[in-house]
């Protein structure tokens, strides 16, 4: 009887965490839908999109699994017929044969990669902090003052390192969705639409106009996600 009573809070806690995670996933799915709908302009082949910005935040804030799930839900909503994609026909299963569709599954994998990179970075930081704490045991008042000064310096360095980690993770995400989106773009243009388009021309269509704006989005998202992590809004372990 006592065992059943002690297990009850534990089950409630697991259930609550599951609901919170699902809510966060749904929130980022909604943000991706809104980003695609509110910024519909540019080329009809590969349109400008704010969805990558949401992908960066989802991977960093939700973690690899939930970040990928949020983008999977976004893709499923669009393929089910909701007009949440960035270019015509905006939704439906026929969107699979549009040239830019490859970027959408790419977003899902990118969110996973971003979350994984940040997981590795956070693990390394925790190990370094533990080693540093074990090595330093100030005894005198002078050592304590020096320790506080060193702590402030390390705090600044840590903020810079964390921001760099978030930006590097986002860049890895950019490379991930382009590595899927660009070959898919070439495949649809050359095979399905029957056009003779060189790979260099494909890069001019799908990469060159967007890579710099995407890197700017990656940097802005890194600043925001680092701030959210500092505020305690981070992936649930």
Image (cartoon, rainbow, N blue to C red):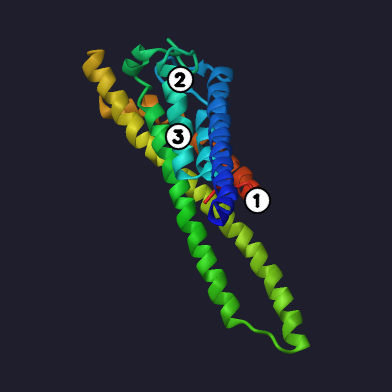
Label 1–label 2 contact, CB within 8 A? no
The answer to whether residue 15 of the structure is visible from this angle is yes
Which residue is identified by label 1? Answer: 232
Which residue is identified by label 2? Answer: 77
Q: Nearer the viewer, residue 88 or 64?
A: 64
First along the sequence among labels 1 and 3: 3
Q: CA distance from mark 1 to mark 3?
A: 21 Å
Residue 68, compared with residue 37, is above or below; it is below
Mark number, residue 129: none
Circle 2 residues within 10 Å: few <14, some 14–19, many ≥20: some
The answer to whether residue 195 of the structure is visible from this angle is no
First along the sequence among labels 1 and 2: 2
Q: CA distance from mark 3 to mark 2?
A: 12 Å
The residue most toward the top is 89
As drawn, is 108 to the left or to the right of 17? left
Instruction: Residue at 49%, 13% (x, y): give it.
Output: 83
Q: Nearer the viewer, residue 52 or 19?
A: 19
First along the sequence among labels 3 and 2: 3
Which residue is identified by label 3? Answer: 69
Q: Nearer the viewer, residue 58 or 86?
A: 58
- Dot 1: element: loop
- Dot 3: element: helix
Instruction: Residue at 52%, 54% (x, y): give it.
Output: 165
The residue most toward the front is 1
Label 3–label 2 contact, CB within 8 A? no
């Amino acid at each position: 009887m006592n065992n059943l009573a002690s297990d009850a809070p534990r089950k409630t806690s697991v259930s609550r965490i599951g609901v919170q995670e699902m809510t966060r996933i749904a929130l980022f799915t909604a943000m991706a839908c809104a980003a695609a709908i509110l910024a519909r302009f540019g080329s009809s082949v590969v349109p400008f999109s704010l969805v990558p910005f949401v992908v960066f935040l989802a991977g960093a804030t939700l973690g690899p699994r939930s970040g990928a799930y949020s983008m999977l839900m976004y893709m499923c909503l669009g393929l089910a017929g909701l007009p949440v994609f960035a270019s015509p026909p905006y939704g439906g299963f026929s969107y699979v044969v549009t040239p830019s569709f490859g970027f959408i599954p790419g977003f899902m994998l990118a969110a996973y990669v971003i979350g994984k990179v940040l997981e590795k970075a956070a693990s390394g930081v925790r190990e370094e902090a533990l080693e540093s704490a074990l090595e330093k045991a100030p005894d005198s008042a002078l050592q304590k003052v020096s320790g506080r000064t060193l702590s402030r310096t390390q705090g600044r360095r840590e903020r810079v390192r964390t921001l760099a980690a978030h930006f590097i993770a986002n860049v890895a995400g950019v490379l991930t969705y382009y590595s899927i989106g660009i070959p898919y773009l070439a495949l649809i243009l050359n095979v399905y639409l029957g056009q003779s388009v060189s790979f260099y021309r494909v890069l001019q269509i799908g990469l060159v106009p967007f890579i710099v704006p995407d890197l700017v989005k990656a940097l802005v998202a890194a600043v925001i996600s680092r701030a959210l992590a500092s505020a305690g809004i981070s992936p649930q372990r």
